[in-house]
Image (spheres, grey):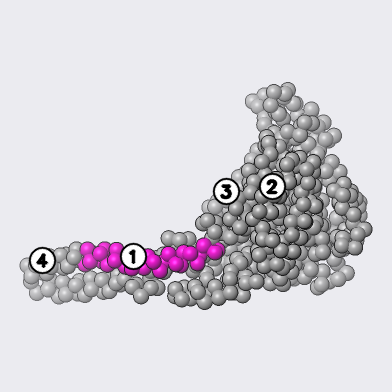
Amino acid sequence: MERIPVQQTQLVPEIVVDYLNQKLDLSHFYSQPNLPASYAELKKQRQYFSPNQRLELHSHLVNQYQNAGINLELTANHSVQEQLNSLLQPQGYTVCTGHQLVLFGGPLFTTYKILTAIKLARTLSLANPSEPVIPIFWLASEDHDFEEIQTVKINGNAISLNLTHDANPVGELMLQKIEQLIEELTKVFPQHAFANELLSQIKRAYQNGTKLAVATLKYYHELYAAFGLVILDANSPTLKQALIPIIKKDLLEQFHFQIQKDSDTILAKQYNLQINARPFNFFYINEAGKRFLIKQNSNHLFQLSENEKDYTAQELTHLIENFPERFSPNVNLRPIFQELILPNLAYIGGPAEIAYWLQLKPIFDAYKLSYPILVLRHMQAFVPNGFAQSVKKFNLNLSQLILPIQELELVFNKLSDFPGFEKELEIIDQNWQTIYDAFLKLNDQSAKDLLQVKLKERTDSKLLLKKFNVLRKEKLKSQFDKLLKLRSLLYPNGVFQERTDLLISYEATRSTDLKEAILNEIDPFDPCLLFFTA
């Protein structure tokens, strides 16, 4: 299996590359680099996490699993139960990742996030068994972007969950006619025992009359219970008690807006930013379950939903204090919520997530809240045996193959048997200049005559070069088309494989559980792009 350091790819933004390289200018925007030695110091900062907080978190998780119909007493679930009990220990810690409620395990990058969290937790726990580290998967049940999660692609076939949705929290969606969706899935699955077991896991989790959040929790539990993954849906009145001071600060004082604006101004001088500072960073979910963006009018009254009365600051404070579960943090403040309710050491995210977490460090500082170590998730591509050798036949390496197509074509042409003669023309031009300078010293008119010859030759050379490039492109087109066909294994339909394909697509064809095999290849402290053959 071949590996490329992610810094040598174009798959991560510049700000993440600088974070991984520990660039000094960026040091104010993270606490510590992702190194094994960094975690000991961070544990000291997390010791303020009280026994009552641990008990609340533990109770919520136990009830959550019970309400989903999951019996933690079963032998198959002992790993999860042990992890939950570890949360009660004064020196029990977590590492966390999360994602939207994507169907059937979601695109491959979701799998990689979870497996990176599991591997990091394993590594840290083995290094110090008296301080267990629990991997947490945060279910983004309050998210409203249904269009982003309703379709999955299995073996090139798009399968969609067609439900009515009004921009409300997706976790509350009640599954209907789900058996039709599973039937579509069955049609594109191979017929053998392991594929049938994969379908059985899906059927056990996704059932009519089940909320999408519960179905997602059950399915991820099916996939990762043996690995000790703890799944957390934090949309809870009990857990959101911790958010009350944050909600007040945000809505009544716009406290976070100015802090993030100031930090974004600094970062924007060098980087493209992932998220924008907003005056209000909470949505309101009314009693009917509808989700609204909170606004403030010119009279300083707050609008919480359409066609309803406006609220004074006093009335809004009453709602916050008595119904915190109705307030849902956006992407700017969800990280704060997470770190308030978890004894957390690290957040595992994709390139875009790491980028926006870096934007939020000053808000953590303002609250004197411990900021987790940021860990870039595992990145990989499934490739057949001999893939690297096939790429080398084109005089390329794997890192060049993942270049954008236009850049790839330039590199391909340059390294081909017809590399062009631009440099040679430059040398000729320099020689002409030397000759012209010599003539100029002898006779002005002779120099002028020579200049005319030089200009005509330059024009002729440009025409020849243009003709050569046309002929070269025609000559290389068939070879480049073959290269693009090879590249399409990494970019099916022009999108990087991890963003479209599902793990079950590969497991169903290979008849083996690939999670442990991938887990063995992950190094959470050395982010690489892995070309994985299985």
- Label 2 close to label 3 by CB (< 8 Å): no
**Residue that badge 4 annotates:** 448
**Can the viewer see residue 451?**
no
Point out the frontmost of discs 2 and 3.
2
The amino acid pointed to by label 4 is Lys
Dominant secondary structure of the magenta stretch? helix
The 10 Å Cα crowd at callout 4, few under 14, some 14 to 19, many 20 or more, is some
Q: Residue at x 34, y 65 (%)?
A: 473
The 10 Å Cα crowd at callout 1, few under 14, some 14 to 19, many 20 or more, is some
Q: Is residue 427 left or right of residue 91?
A: left
Point out the frontmost of discs 2 and 4.
2
**Residue that badge 1 annotates:** 473
**Residues under labels 2 and 3: Cα distance?**
46 Å
**Residue that badge 2 annotates:** 181
Magenta-colored span: 461-490
Q: Quadrant of the C terminus?
A: bottom right
Whether residue 488 is in magenta: the answer is: yes
**Residues under labels 1 and 3: Cα distance?**
45 Å
**Residue that badge 3 annotates:** 265
Q: Residue at x 38, y 70 (%)?
A: 414
**Residues under labels 4 and 1: Cα distance?**
37 Å
In front: 178, or 459? 178
SS for dot 2: helix
Answer with mark 1 or mark 3, whichever residue precedes in sequence: 3
